[in-house]
Image (cartoon, grey):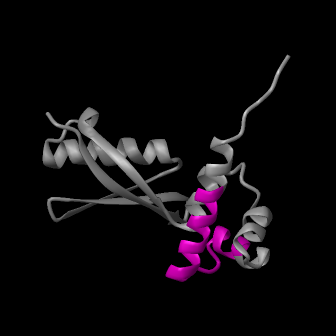
Amino acid sequence: MKRIKMELIIEQAEDGLWGRVNYKDNLVSDFGNSVTELEEKIKGVLFDFEDVKPEDVEFDHLYDVYALFLKFDYLKISKVAERAGMNPGLLRQYASGVKHPSASQGKRIETTLHQLADELKDAFVFAE
């Protein structure tokens, strides 16, 4: 079967992560302690109810800010905020789930992360 690519929206849950996909106008959701566990559970539901083989599913991840900093815990919030021209305390509130960013703030964070990724792609390590 042809690979099925779908958006997996990952958000903060009380005890981990909550994720959801839309497949054939059906909302499929589940909880997990990690992105990997969440993916496996969603694939299981898709198989059980839609007969979609897990190996045929590929996800594009869309993170809320909390889930983003949980997944990429090596990112330093204060430095990302500085690069984005944001108050570090505000970004920490977004990352902890106390507050939620507007669409424009979310886009600002996303753009900053993509700029950092571009810089890292151009970095080389010299070793003798």
Is 109 positioned to the left or the right of 2 in the image? Answer: right
Q: Residue 110: percent from the left, percent from the top?
A: 56, 65
Residue at the image point whose x is 36% and y is 45% from the top: 41
Q: Which residue is farthest top? A: 128
Quarter residue 54 falls in: top left
Q: Which residue is farthest right? A: 128
Between 15 and 26, the one lying in front of the other is: 26
- Magenta span includes 90: no
For the question of whether residue 37 can be seen, the reply is: yes
Task: Tell me: residue 30, above or below residue 55.
Answer: below
Quarter residue 48 falls in: top left
Quadrant (top left/top right/bottom left/bottom right) for the N terminus: top left
Between 103 and 98, the one lying in front of the other is: 103
Q: Residue 17: percent from the left, percent from the top?
A: 50, 58
Residue at the image point whose x is 68% and y is 45% from the top: 120
Residue at the image point whose x is 29% and y is 53% from the top: 6
Quarter residue 43 falls in: top left
Q: Residue 94: percent from the left, percent from the top?
A: 64, 74
Query: Which secondary structure class fits the magenta region best?
Result: helix
Is 99 positioned to the left or the right of 79 in the image? Answer: left
Residue at the image point whose x is 78% and y is 74% from the top: 88
- Magenta span includes 103: yes
Magenta range = 91-115
Q: Residue 26: percent from the left, percent from the top?
A: 18, 63
